[in-house]
Amino acid sequence: MLQIIQKFINKVFKDLFKTRKHIKLGLYGPPNGGKTTLANRICVDWLGEEMGSVSHVEHETREVQIKEQINITSGKKALSFNLVDTPGIATKIDYEDFMKKGLSEKESKKRAKEATKGVIDAIKWLDDMDLVIVVLDGTKDPYSQVNITIIGNLAARDIPVLIVANKVDLKKADVKKVEAAFPQYDVVGISAKYGQGIDKFYEALFVMAGK
């Protein structure tokens, strides 16, 4: 009987360790909010290398990208996770919008097709996420249909969420407006490009992960 109990206890601790070791941290949000820029910032800070390419044209990231075993520390606190950078969520993807940005018709249609698949994949991946960072462009209206859809999907799955109001280096950025739009969640204002507010972001990660 004691052996059975001990095996059960060992299994619980083993499963717990395994779960904590392989936390999946997802970056979600609309296109061009700065998800990949933030992913690159995290990876450069803790791994010394970037994760993906960025562009002024929407949907540069069209496939789910994963960087495994990122370990971040703050004092005596430590957190390990697999970082999942997802394609930008959009309710409408029109190839003509890419043509307006200078892409050829062939390139635009290919990009639109890949971006549409990327959105579907990103939503599917939600079921695998332990924690989610929603990255929003702090200069834009947070009350958009896309943002509300993303937050609604996360709320339905009861996934812990931290909202990042990105691009605070720009004058139009309004963190308080983002906070007012989603008062049920913690909001951190950062500039992923320049690293402004990134320490507060990491601290918020520890809080979200229960560290």
Image (cartoon, rainbow, N blue to C red):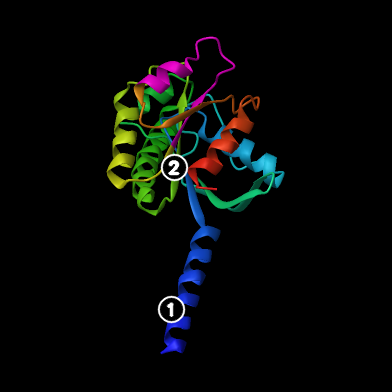
Spot occupied by residue 26 in the image (x, y as percentages of width and height): 47, 44
Query: For residue 100, which numbered disc appears in the image?
Result: none
Name the residue type under label 2.
Answer: Val
Q: Which residues are magenta?
A: 162-180
Are the residues tagged 1 and 2 within 8 Å (C-beta)? no
115 and 194: which is toward the camera: 194
**Against 170, is 116 above or below?**
below
In the rendered view, would you say 129 is above or below 142? below
Q: Amino acid at mark 1?
A: Phe
Q: Residue furthest top?
A: 171
Q: Residue at x 43, y 29 (%)?
A: 31
The answer to which of 14 and 99 lies nearer the viewer is 14
Q: Quadrant of the N terminus?
A: bottom left
Which of the 4 quarters of the picture holds residue 88? top left
Is residue 78 magenta-colored? Answer: no
> Which label number is shown at residue 8?
1
State the residue lying farthest toward the right. 48
Foreground pick, 107 / 63: 63
Sequence-first disc among 1 and 2: 1
Left or right: where 151 falls relative to 162: left
Circle 1 or circle 2, nearest the eye: 1
Q: Residue at x 52, y 58 (%)?
A: 20
Asked which secondary structure carries label 2, the reply is: strand
Count of numbered tags: 2
Residue 199: give x, y in percent of width and height: 63, 32
Percent across and percent down for residue 107 are: 45, 33
User: Which dot marks residue 132?
Assistant: 2
**Per the image, is 175 magenta?**
yes
Graded by Cα atoms within 10 Å as few (under 14), some (14 to 19) or many (20 or more), the crowding at tag 1 reads few
Where residue 33 appears, x then y in whole percent?
A: 48, 27
